[in-house]
Image: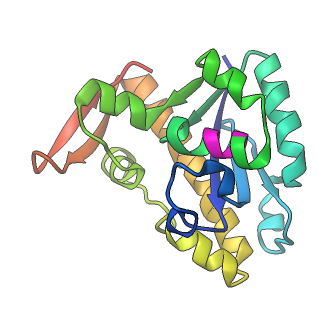
Amino acid sequence: MSVLAIDLETKNMSYDIGGFGNTHMFQVSTVATWNGKTGTVYVDEKIDSFAKSGHIIKSLSELKYDLDDHFQKGGVLLGHNIKAFDLPILRDSMDIYCINKYLKEEKFIDTSRILMKEHGERYQLKNLVKCTMNDAKLMDSADAPKLWKMGQYDEVVEYCMKDTQLVYDLWKHGQDNGLVKGFSMEKGEYKELEVDW
């Protein structure tokens, strides 16, 4: 099974468009994918310093073809909260209709959804990667649209790529060890969370 971690950033916030339910009104700034070895960034703005990172850079318009190709080859998408956020936005605001196939055939792994279902509590990605791998996100997700508006495209693209790598590494850790770690806000303690994904 070919697993492709995916993450997106937007130019606007949910409160700008009347809430998360208006997925068609989000404006996608960048999308990153990571398969454990190779990263691809889809972006239309010029990103000078990130271009030197060795990752593949494509325009946003190419994403739908790559996602459809991944699906046709039996691939699965991976992300943290992708069923509620990333996938609907890709489908509704970018008209990437192959997302419907991923959703209908459940060809995705949503680490947030799985943990909520199996452990009854929502765990943020930054919590899980800190506790499991002693790693960290590059910024808070709410900062990305602000930085984008300020023209700091490289920082947003780097953040998006790092998130795909973190989700992939978290998923891989769970696969290899049968658990991930997180701090339970409800119980006020660190927990080992068994996973079967």
Q: Please tell me which residue is depicted at 35% across the width and 46% down the height of the picture.
A: 128
Q: For residue 90: magenta?
A: yes
Task: Please give left or right for residue 16 compared with residue 136 in the image.
Answer: right
Tell me where residue 40 appears, x and y as whole percent: 78, 48
Task: Please give left or right for residue 113 compared with residue 116 in the image.
Answer: right
Q: Residue at the front extreme? A: 18
Instruction: Let me know if residue 152 appears in the view.
Output: yes
Q: Residue at the bottom extreme? A: 150
Task: Give the image quarter of residue 111.
Answer: top left
Task: Please give left or right for residue 7 compared with residue 74 in the image.
Answer: left
Tell me where residue 102 appears, x and y as whole percent: 67, 23
In this orientation, which residue lies closer to the viewer: 60 or 190?
60
Q: For residue 184: magenta?
A: no
Q: Please tell me which residue is depicted at 60% across the width and 63% down the height of the picture.
A: 159
Please say if 57 is above or below 91.
below
Q: Main secondary structure of the magenta part?
A: helix
Q: Which residues are magenta?
A: 87-91
Question: Considering the image in quadrants, where does the C terminus appear?
Answer: top left
Q: Please tell me which residue is depicted at 44% across the width and 24% down the height of the picture.
A: 176
Instruction: Let me know if residue 107 appears in the view.
Output: no
Tell me where residue 162 appears, x and y as whole percent: 59, 56
Task: Give the image quarter of residue 69.
Answer: top right
Please say if 14 is above or below 174.
below
Task: Please give left or right for residue 187 compared with residue 22 in the image.
Answer: left
